[in-house]
Image (cartoon, rainbow, N blue to C red):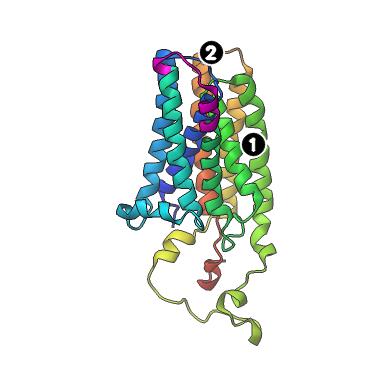
Amino acid sequence: MHPAPSIILFTTLSGLGFGLLAFLGINMPGSTGFIAFVFFAIAYVLAVGGLLFSTFHLGHPERALKAFSQWRSSWLSREGICAVAALIVMAIYGFGRVFMDQHWGLIGGIGAVLSLATVYTTSMIYAQLKTVPRWHMPLTSLLFMAFSLAGGALLAGQVQIALPLLIVAGIVQIAYWLLGDKRLAQSGSTLESATGLGHIGKVKAFEPPHTGTNYLMREFIHVVGRKHAQKLRIIALGLGFVIPVIALLLPFGHMLALVAVLSHVAGIFVSRWLFFAQAEHVVGLYYGKR
């Protein structure tokens, strides 16, 4: 079983897109006219493209609009509302930058806050899940925010800001892995708690619940070998943070900037794959996969 490509694309692209919109909202870079149009176009392609990929992961994409009605209790609904609000406000702000050579600071600031709020609400969709101990901790939201800000600064061409943000994001990523590896054991979830039979003593599965696959097994049970995971972590760190930092420390050139961006995006894709593949949903205990 492997994580769905649509959800990996969604979290990666939307995080980068809204991160770039946040920097554009605070006038970084301060370009106008056609150059500003290019930056806004890149941000909207990433943000909107990521959101579209998220609909592919829904069981009934045609019902996506219904998600907006559950904002009182659903982080998914809050994410959708924040995303739409951010895109509308930033479109107004972008119109001023592109066609009127104006920086409407208040509108841009509101759009930047809404853009980051979208990333935060996305992270909370996963961080709220007690059934996935690796996700259920504050570092999950911090990881999403760090990736979005670092990637946004990189795409915005803000080298002096991107450098420390990339380093911080890399440190957060390492901390997330180190703490995340212990979360399932610390949660106290066992086969006994999964089956509800702990009161009779040690439980051992006699046979699998069923012979075929199902939705739970496809979506929530992924097994990644430790050696395989360690190699992928090294690749994610190297591509996502080490190479971009080295490229930015060298004398500036457009080719090096492109290398930094492409390498970072590739590294984040690998990191996101691991984020979902190593989720360790407690339902795996019931199926004997933990």
Q: Determine the secondary structure under disc 2.
A: loop
Task: Locate residue 57, reporting x and y percent.
Answer: 38, 52
Residue drawn at (38%, 44%), measured in percent from left and top?
53
Residue 203 magenta: no
Foreground residue, 130 or 191? 130
Q: Is residue 74 visible?
A: yes
The 10 Å Cα crowd at callout 1, few under 14, some 14 to 19, many 20 or more, is: many
Amino acid at the residue labelled 2? Gly
Q: Quick one: label 2 or label 1, which is nearer the N terminus?
A: 1
At a point 63% along the width and 69% down the height, the residue shown is 189
* Residue 248, position as x, y percentages in the image: 60, 20
Residue 8 at least partly seen: no
Give the camera-side residue of 65 and 258. 65
> Residue 153: percent from the left, percent from the top?
57, 26
Point out the stretch of residues depicted in magenta.
98-111
Disc 2 vs disc 1: Cβ atoms closer than 8 Å? Answer: no
Figure check: 262 above or below 174: above
Point out residue 95 in the picture as x, y percentages from the top left corner: 40, 22
What's the magenta bit mostly, secondary-structure-wise?
helix
**For mark 2, what is the residue?**
253
- The residue tagged 1 is 170
| Image quarter in which the N terminus is found | bottom left
- Is 108 on the left-hand or right-hand side of 51? right
Q: How many marks?
A: 2
Q: Indicate whether 194 appears above or below 278.
A: below
User: In the image as oriented, which residue stretches furthest toward the left?
Assistant: 62
Q: Quadrant of residue 37?
A: top left
- At a point 56% along the width and 51% down the height, the residue shown is 124
Q: Quadrant of the C terminus?
A: bottom right
Q: Compute the Cα span from label 2 to label 1.
A: 23 Å
Say what secondary structure mark 1 lies in. Answer: helix
